[in-house]
Image (cartoon, rainbow, N blue to C red):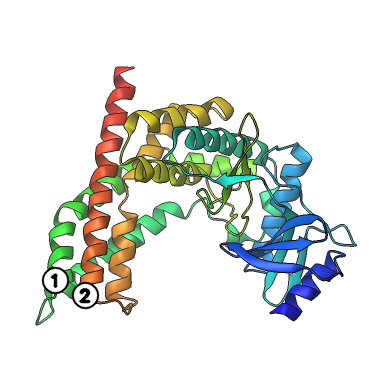
Amino acid sequence: METAFAEILAGYGIVQPARIEPCGHAAWLVLAGDDMLVLREIKRRSAKADLSLRAIEHLLAQGFAGLPAWRRDAAGQLGVRAGHSTWLLSELVDGHGALLGLESDALATAAALGSLHRASAELNGDEMPEPLDMYHRYLSRCRDRIRSLRTYVLMAHNKLRRTAMDRGFLAAVETVLPQAEATLERLESSQWAELAEQSRKQGLFVYRRVGRNGVVLTNEPQPRAVFVDWGGCRRECHVTDVARLALRVIKGTGGDSALLGRVIAAYDRERPMSAGEKSILMLVLEFPDRLYQLAQRYYEHKRDWPENTFVRHLKRAMQEYQTQMACIQEHTEASRGG
């Protein structure tokens, strides 16, 4: 790996010996002379990685302030390709990972995400290959996950000897599955198709790495959110990005509906959301993705965890889901009252 790092850094014009050490998810701190840099890996080198690079270039051209200072190679390109990855090199941002349970971090991140989505418009999505078009796939994904949950129910019911996980899962889906089906029905009758098509025509893209590993809050007098990990950039409807932020805030605060409202308002000030978008956002937040992912690991992927580990994760997932639903209901009632 040392040889690969040397080749990557040489592509950026750094040939003197440098100390390299891990500093986060797919990120390495590079000490080269007086420079403190961060090398980040995008574990894709085809069209998906190209989208990330094009998105960054687009934001730079728009004057978006939420990016680190990037280094370029001798040809003026942002990324250096090595192996099956694309590598980005930037100045180290003096700050801390976004702790979305803290009000200041959550509000700064929400405002920056709104600015990012506003600046992301007009990246010509029609030039990108169709397989990367995720705008219209969210409802299909929800349908697939509900079908999978039904299949997992059959698998648990038909076991000769049910495990503790089987019993816990069957008790959980008795309530969660009807709620998920009702949420999907409301999503299908919502303005999702129109919103997705609008996002596609505007050429919007989403960041997907909202959270401590992907966002740094600077130590400046007026902290600013900097988006540093571009490995998840996708062409997708922007509401899904706002939902990721909102879910992390709900989890980080234990379901503080008042802060959730302020986060949505902070985003809304930078990129105004219609009433329909806000309604769809609440529906996206209701979907039980965490329970589905855990059940998939157990029934489909056969993950090698002890039984008590699965049960512990199941209890935690259900607690998070109940907190999530209660927070959404409180926020919705407060919004109607306002």
Query: Is residue 225 shown left or right of residue 104?
Result: right
Residue farthest along the top direction in this orientation: 338
Q: Residue at x 28, y 67 (%)?
A: 295
Quadrant housing residue 131: bottom right
Disc 1 and disc 2 in contact, CB within 8 angstroms: yes
Q: Secondary structure at mark 2?
A: helix
Amino acid type of the residue that numbered disc 2 sits on in the rendered structure: Glu
Q: Is residue 130 above or below residue 175?
A: below
Residue 229 image point, x, y percent: 61, 55
What residue is pinned by disc 1?
164
Quadrant housing residue 160: bottom left
Q: Nearer the viewer, residue 251 or 287?
A: 251
Residue 17 image point, x, y percent: 82, 71
Q: Earlier in the sequence, mark 1 or mark 2?
A: 1
Query: Is residue 204 shown left or right of residue 254?
Result: right
Q: Nearer the viewer, residue 124 or 176?
A: 176
The quadrant of the rendering that contains the N terminus is: bottom right
Q: Can residue 284 be seen at all in this image of the molecule?
A: no
Crowdedness of circle 1 by 10 Å Cα count: few (<14), some, many (20+)?
few
Residue farthest along the left direction in this orientation: 160
Q: Residue at x 40, y 57 (%)?
A: 140
Amino acid type of the residue that numbered disc 1 sits on in the rendered structure: Ala
Query: Which disc number belongs to residue 307?
Result: 2
Query: Is residue 58 shown left or right of residue 12?
Result: left
Q: Is residue 306 above or below residue 118?
A: below
